[in-house]
Image (cartoon, rainbow, N blue to C red):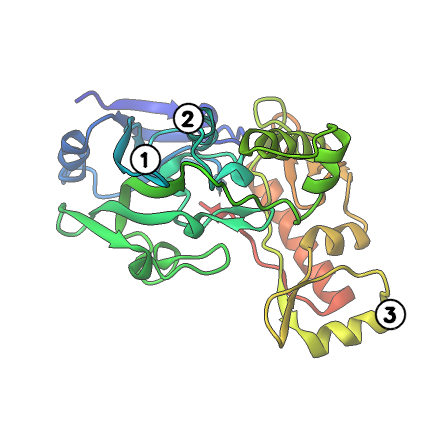
Amino acid sequence: MHIKRNISLKPYNTFGIDVLANFFISVSSINELKQVLALNEHPNKLILGGGSNMLLTKDFEGLVIHINLKGIEIISKNDDFVTIKASAGENWHEFVLWCINNDFGGIENLSLIPGNVGTAPIQNIGAYGIELKDTFVSCEAISLETKTLETFTKTDCDFGYRNSIFKQRAKGKYILTSVTFILSKNNHKLHIDYGAIASQLETMHITHPTIQDVSKAVIAIRQSKLPNPKEIGNSGSFFKNPVISKSNFNTLLQNFSDIPSYPISEDEVKVPAGWLIEKAGFKGKQFGDYGVHKNQALVLVNYGNAKGSDILNLSKLIQKTVKRLFDISIEVEVNIL
């Protein structure tokens, strides 16, 4: 067990924010993780996965534990389905590509989402009409209180829109170590009606798409809209798409006839936060080393040496402006630390 001191977390967060950890260790086994958690001399601990869903605003005065658990295992399979267990430290997109290369279907719409497998269930990642919960079977997690490994079923996780038990009553109480999925082996059910997937497939001259084609289409769409974190620091979508009542939406239509929406239920609709932010005048706006991306208003970016506090203050200004203009509150999707 090798604990390092005064380590920059810049390589460990996709925003590329340069803050220091007083102490830092990367763990690659569950036993090692249990040993580190038992270190009483470091009571203040921060669990770090892919660093894709967080904004670091200050140095961390404690021990940062980087989850580097690796491995993908086929648990069971039959003629139609396969059950796969992936360790928490696996890169999410690389896991998706591994599944697609093996012709396992169900998560192709979630291609190119940043982060690791272990953090995916926490916010129930989703894109283009698909959510993680759609293929989720269970996950394993270590209790910070008992240091024992527990299993959570789909029901246990209480998934919602960008939400789960791990963001609510179990927040900060567990470390996810693996996630198990059930995927199709044949007769894949494609979801290509959401967003621009169908038109992208048409542009690619594909009339009978496979899961590989859908993944390539999603990647092309995301690359055209979203900056690569390796080139421009960002955490993907910074805000959740708000869900409002139909009556509120109909009121908005009177002043904003072009406002888009997606039905959630008989009484609720989802409004794209990106559209609200763009209408508020923030799309492409730059404030020195930080700003809002030119192609996607949902994405706040670090162009170089921005501080986390700079980006946090910008997000608050955006929230305040959207609330004033549309009377809609947009929630931050990333974790602020």
Q: x and y percent of residue 303 in the render?
A: 66, 28
Q: Residue at x 39, y 49 (%)?
A: 122
Q: In the picture, which quadrant includes the C terminus?
A: top left
Q: Is residue 287 visible?
A: no
Q: Are marks 2 and 1 in contact (CB under 8 Å)?
A: no
Graded by Cα atoms within 10 Å as few (under 14), some (14 to 19) or many (20 or more), the crowding at tag 2 reads few
Instruction: Depth check: give the residue in front, 97 or 224.
Output: 97
Which residue is denoted by mark 1 in the rendering?
88
Q: Residue at x 13, y 51 (%)?
A: 146
Instruction: Depth check: give the residue in front, 152 or 143.
Output: 152
Amino acid on which the number 3 mark rests in the picture: Asn
Q: x and y percent of residue 137 in the render?
A: 32, 49
Which residue is denoted by mark 2 in the rendering?
102
Graded by Cα atoms within 10 Å as few (under 14), some (14 to 19) or many (20 or more), the crowding at tag 3 reads few
Q: Residue at x 68, y 55 (%)?
A: 273
Tell me if 294 is positioned left or right of 58 in this view: right
| Of pointers 2 and 1, the one earlier in the residue sequence | 1
Q: Which numbered tag is attached to residue 255?
A: 3
